[in-house]
Image: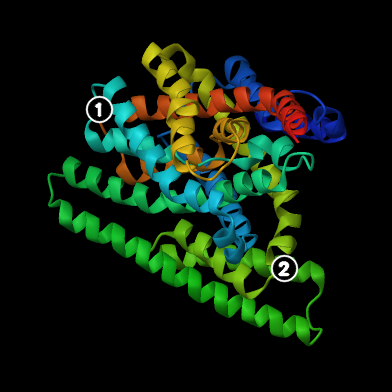
């Protein structure tokens, strides 16, 4: 109860001075993760994130937050714009694949005690980016719109695109741990992907079609239109989960379908994402801080090296390679390469892997690698978003 009281008071304080915080080289996520660490040290103590009820509570909050993020971000994407913006297409194809490959390769070389599939889930979980950790960047109108939109759309879609890879590697892990045929688990993973996509398309198209007709007839108010889209996000997740599909893929595809049918769905959903969604986001980072407080004594040099590589070499090299031939300046390439924060999606995907796999030999290394990388990202990107944005804008203007 003390933890909850502290968290709510902190939310109120941050809300009251939020405009002041935006002008400083810190982020709200940075404040809450450090606050969580402090509470973990002074009050909570060590928490095993793999054991109920903590695992259940954290996973539930994180799942709800990610479902809303997946649906909202996807609904805001104009598929036509993606075709026109070659930068986004390259980052979501060549860039994402290379990031996963480099993440897996680096994990194999650094964590020599891990099996291939254990290294693979680390690489996949840390592939998605989180624009919420770089809001100063994507909201800064002085930064060229093409660069801002590329980073925002990449962040909005790469978490959903990473889920199929995670399901496949989890399937391989389950097969190896249970000494069962890999084919069966791969088939199950593919069924999850297929059913999830089918549910997402169905719920998105049918649900948004009904909302449009209701709006045209003047039956629905703007407030309830927002609620209706929120329900579609949760419905996609629950229905897919009940029939054996991936709820996250359903929410992601459902958001794409809703955005395609209802052009202003993203704008309506943004109202939620910027308020209640932000509250859930900060809750997850506060809980992550509490968990990290107990993990700090177990952090090794290998974990630190991998976390640094994940935010630099593993992220930036794929961006450089994927943007070859686009005639984008080196300043812009490096700027986009650096601003690939790891955040909410990585936390949730890690918790999903832990829930699906149960106990496995490399789980301690997995937990530390993911959570420490996210922590480093929160600090590094929160501290550099403002000064590097100003530097990039200044250099960009001097060249024009």
Q: Residues within 10 Å of mark 2 (few under 14, many from 20)?
A: some
Q: Picture coordinates of residue 141 (x, y %)?
A: 79, 43
Q: In the shown orientation, is residue 88 left or right of residue 22? A: left
Locate the N terminus by quadrant: top right
Residue at left offset 74%, top offset 61%: 267
Whether residue 218 is visible = yes
Residue at left offset 61%, top offset 44%: 151
- Closer-to-camera residue (288/111): 111
Q: Secondary structure at mark 1?
A: loop
Q: Quadrant of residue 176?
A: top left
Residue at left offset 49%, top offset 37%: 319
Q: Earlier in the sequence, mark 1 or mark 2?
A: 1
Q: Picture coordinates of residue 224 (x, y %)?
A: 76, 70
Locate the C terminus by quadrant: top right
Q: Quadrant of residue 106?
A: top left
Q: How is the image coloured?
A: rainbow
- Closer-to-camera residue (168/333): 333
Q: In the shown orientation, is residue 264 left or right of residue 236? A: right
The vertical placement of 205 against 279, above or below, is below
Q: Secondary structure at mark 2?
A: loop
Q: Residues within 10 Å of mark 1 (few under 14, many from 20)?
A: some
Which mark, by number, is residue 364?
none
- Closer-to-camera residue (58/351): 351
CA gap between label 1 and label 2 equals 46 Å
Which mark, by number, is residue 114?
1
Q: Picture coordinates of residue 393 (x, y %)?
A: 75, 32
Which mark, by number, is residue 264?
2
- Closer-to-camera residue (257/32): 257
């Amino acid at each position: 109860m003390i933890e909850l009281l502290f968290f709510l008071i902190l939310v109120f304080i941050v809300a009251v001075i939020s405009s002041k915080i935006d002008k400083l080289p810190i982020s709200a996520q940075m404040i809450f993760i450090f606050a969580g660490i402090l509470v973990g040290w002074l009050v909570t103590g060590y928490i095993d994130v793999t054991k109920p009820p903590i695992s259940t509570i954290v996973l539930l909050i994180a799942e709800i937050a990610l479902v809303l993020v997946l649906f909202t971000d996807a609904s805001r994407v104009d598929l036509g714009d993606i075709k026109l913006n070659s930068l986004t297409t390259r980052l979501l194809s060549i860039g994402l694949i290379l990031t996963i490959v480099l993440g897996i390769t680096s994990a194999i070389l650094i964590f020599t005690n891990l099996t291939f599939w254990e290294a693979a889930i680390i690489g996949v979980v840390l592939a998605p980016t989180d624009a919420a950790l770089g809001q100063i960047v994507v909201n800064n109108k002085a930064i060229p719109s093409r660069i801002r939109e590329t980073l925002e759309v990449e962040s909005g879609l790469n978490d959903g695109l990473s889920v199929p890879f995670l399901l496949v590697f989890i399937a391989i892990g389950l097969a190896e741990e249970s000494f069962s045929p890999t084919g069966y688990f791969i088939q199950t993973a593919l069924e999850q992907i297929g059913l999830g996509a089918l549910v997402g398309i169905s719920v998105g198209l049918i649900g948004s079609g009904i909302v449009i007709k209701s709006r045209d007839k003047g039956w629905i108010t703007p407030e309830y239109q927002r609620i209706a889209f929120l329900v579609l996000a949760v419905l996609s997740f629950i229905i897919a989960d009940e029939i054996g599909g991936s709820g996250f893929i359903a929410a992601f595809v459902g958001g794409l379908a809703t955005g395609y049918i209802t052009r202003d769905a993203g704008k309506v959903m943004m109202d939620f994402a910027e308020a209640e969604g932000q509250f859930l986001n900060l809750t997850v980072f506060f809980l992550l801080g509490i968990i990290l407080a107990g993990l700090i004594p177990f952090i090794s040099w290998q974990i630190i090296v991998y976390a640094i590589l994940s935010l630099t070499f593993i992220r930036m090299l794929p961006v450089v390679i994927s943007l070859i031939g686009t005639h984008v300046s080196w300043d812009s390439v490096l700027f986009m390469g650096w601003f690939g924060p790891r955040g909410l999606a990585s936390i949730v995907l890690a918790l999903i892997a832990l829930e699906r796999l149960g106990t496995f030999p490399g789980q301690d290394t997995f937990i530390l690698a993911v959570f420490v990388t996210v922590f480093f990202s929160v600090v590094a990107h929160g501290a550099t978003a403002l000064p590097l944005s100003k530097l990039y804008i200044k250099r960009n203007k001097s060249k024009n």
